[in-house]
């Protein structure tokens, strides 16, 4: 993949280990608002999609959806810095990719403020040339729009870019946008779970990204 000039990354489950915090935030919102409890597996199925999608079944058209999201975010932000960390090796790998002359971008279903906080916490602040959050698009992942918007802002062609993520939604978004995709296996999902999305490459450890990207 030596022709790659731009590496786009997902955030949660790819760069930062925030899955336990995410699940606890969902459980908190369920308990506060008396929602029927869902299993971790059910919540994880939607990991990589925005909160509006995850809570959509409870939208009553009278503000309940916004209330659920606010409750989730209040808990998530209160516990964020204690429960979030970078996956081992990720920070060095991102910095090495940039040092090789490859541009980088973040394409996440988290809102921009939360994404920037996560990057700052783990030492990745300033390492992304562009950040696309859920509040920057009309159609979130798995739609192509977030990836396409990142490429447009960078002035990059789809042929020279790759999208790196941990969920089927990441792979589907990348493929829909016409970029190559790398599915990472250090997040919450197994190869069997991700295989139906047909990523172009697999990475079992962050350092493998350097080999795949070449240079």
Image (cartoon, rainbow, N blue to C red):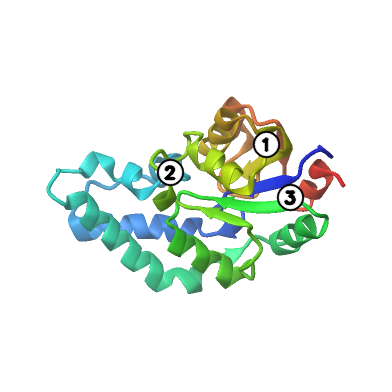
The quadrant where residue 88 appears: bottom right
Circle 1 residue: 157
The quadrant where residue 114 appears: bottom left
Residue 95 pos. (x, y %): 75, 62
Q: Is residue 162 left or right of residue 152?
A: right
- Relative to 70, is 60 above or below? above
Q: Earlier in the sequence, mark 3 or mark 2?
A: 2
Residue drawn at (44%, 54%) of the image: 110
Residues under numbered marks 3 and 1 in contact, where contact means CB atoms less than 8 Å apart: no
The quadrant where residue 128 appears: bottom right
View extreme (right): residue = 215
Looking at the image, is mark 1 or mark 2 nearer the viewer? 1
Residue drawn at (59%, 33%) of the image: 194
Tell me the tag on residue 7: none
Q: Earlier in the sequence, mark 1 or mark 2?
A: 2
Residue drawn at (62%, 52%) of the image: 105
Q: Nearer the viewer, residue 89 or 123?
A: 123
Circle 3 residue: 205
**Residue 122 visible in rendering:** yes
Residue drawn at (68%, 40%) of the image: 162
Q: Cα distance, mark 3 to mark 2?
A: 23 Å
If the image is split into quadrants, where does the N terminus sit? Answer: top right
Q: Cα distance, mark 3 to mark 1?
A: 27 Å
* SS at circle 1: loop
Residue 22 pos. (x, y %): 43, 57
**Residue 166 visible in rendering:** no
Q: Cα distance, mark 1 to mark 2?
A: 25 Å
Q: Earlier in the sequence, mark 3 or mark 1?
A: 1
Tell me the tag on residue 49: 2
View extreme (left): residue = 62
């Amino acid at each position: 993949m030596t022709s790659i000039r731009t590496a786009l990354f997902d955030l949660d489950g790819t760069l930062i280990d925030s899955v336990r915090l995410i699940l606890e935030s969902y459980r908190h919102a369920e308990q506060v608002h008396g929602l029927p409890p869902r299993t971790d597996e059910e919540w994880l199925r939607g990991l990589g999609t925005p909160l509006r999608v995850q809570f959509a079944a409870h939208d009553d058209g009278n503000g309940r959806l916004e209330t659920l999201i606010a409750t989730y975010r209040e808990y998530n932000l209160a516990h964020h810095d204690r429960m979030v960390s970078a996956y081992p090796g990720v920070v060095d790998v991102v910095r090495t990719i940039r040092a090789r002359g490859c541009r980088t971008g973040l394409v996440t279903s988290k809102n921009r403020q939360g994404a920037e906080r996560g990057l700052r916490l783990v030492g990745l602040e300033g390492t992304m040339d562009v950040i696309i959050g859920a509040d920057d698009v009309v159609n979130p992942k798995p739609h192509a729009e977030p990836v396409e918007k990142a490429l447009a802002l960078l002035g990059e062609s789809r042929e020279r870019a790759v999208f790196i993520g941990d969920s089927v939604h990441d792979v589907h978004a990348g493929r829909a946008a016409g970029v190559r995709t790398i599915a990472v296996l250090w997040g919450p999902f197994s190869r069997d779970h991700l295989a139906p999305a047909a990523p172009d490459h697999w990475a079992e450890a962050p350092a493998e990204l350097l080999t795949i990207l070449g240079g």
